[in-house]
């Protein structure tokens, strides 16, 4: 079963060599974050999201798990968990697709053409069907509030990264203090 493993590595390298910023979560190649910009000429334009991607052991034969880390207002994205309801990823996935397809085709299509009849966020779906102008305004408000470049920096592995940075700073300053003291 080295084939899925090699394909996973190849697809991840292809994604890293594209214009997307990829940040690994662990040492393995199965979990990572990808920086994703909202499609141009849409209510999501200017928004930047951190997308968590988990590749199953059977990838590419089984679809990746995709979720928004920072908030987005969309009928097909769960507001609390960030889970994406996307038929192509969840149900009609094919080994012909790769990770670049997810970020260049599937997610932009999801944002450009929401499906309010299959919602994970019922409020967003109802508002979209009732008043598209108010829906677009709410999308823009969420982009302003939760989807700025500084927001994705704060959404990155808050628990472990911040702790590591603090401990590295502490170690760095304590090393300097020890190195700067003369011997008796």
Image (tube, rainbow, N blue to C red):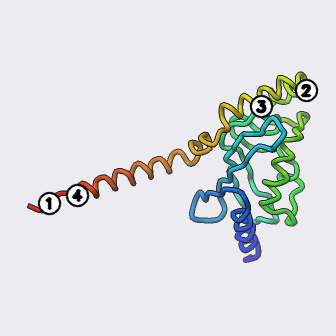
Q: Which mark is residue 173?
A: none
Indicate which label's residue lies in the foreground, 3 or 1: 1
- Residue labelled with disc 3: 139
Residue of label 2: 129
Measured in 3D between alpha carbons, the distance from the residue under mark 1 to the one under mark 4, in whole angstroms, is 9 Å
Neighbour tally class for label 3: few under 14, some 14-19, many 20 plus, Cα within 10 Å: many
Secondary structure under tag 4 reads helix
Tell us which disc is closer to us: 1 or 4.
1
Q: Does the CB distance between marks 3 and 1 fall below 8 Å?
A: no
Mark 3 vs 1, N-terminal side: 3
Residue mark closest to the camera, 4 vs 2: 4
In the image: residue 159, left or right of residue 110:
left
User: Nearest the camera: 89 or 146?
Assistant: 146
- Residue drawn at x 69%, y 44% is 49
Figure check: 18 above or below 159: below
Residue that mark 1 sits on: 182
Judged from this view, the residue extending furthest toward the left is 184
> SS at mark 1?
loop
Q: Quadrant of residue 174?
A: bottom left
Label located before the other in sequence (3 or 4): 3
Report x, y in % for residue 53: 70, 54
Q: How many marks?
A: 4
Quarter of the figure with residue 153 = top right
Residue that mark 4 sits on: 178
| Residue sitting at x 73%, y 62% | 18
Q: Earlier in the sequence, mark 2 or mark 1?
A: 2
């Amino acid at each position: 079963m080295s084939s899925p493993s090699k394909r996973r590595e190849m697809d991840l390298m292809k994604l890293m060599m594209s214009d997307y910023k990829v940040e690994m979560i662990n040492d393995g190649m199965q979990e990572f974050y990808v920086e994703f910009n909202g499609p141009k000429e849409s209510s999501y334009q200017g928004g930047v999201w951190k997308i968590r991607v988990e590749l199953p052991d059977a990838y590419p034969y089984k679809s990746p798990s995709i979720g928004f880390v920072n908030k987005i207002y969309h009928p097909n994205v769960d507001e609390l968990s960030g889970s994406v309801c996307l038929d192509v990823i969840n149900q009609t996935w094919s080994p012909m697709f790769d990770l670049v397809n997810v970020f260049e085709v599937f997610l932009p299509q999801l944002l450009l053409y929401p499906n309010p009849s299959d919602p994970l966020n019922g409020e967003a779906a109802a508002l979209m069907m009732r008043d598209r102008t108010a829906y677009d305004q709410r999308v823009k408000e969420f982009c302003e509030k939760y989807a700025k470049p500084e927001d994705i920096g704060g959404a990155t592995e808050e628990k472990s990264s911040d702790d590591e940075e603090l401990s590295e700073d502490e170690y760095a300053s304590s090393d300097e203090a020890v190195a700067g003291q003369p011997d008796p």
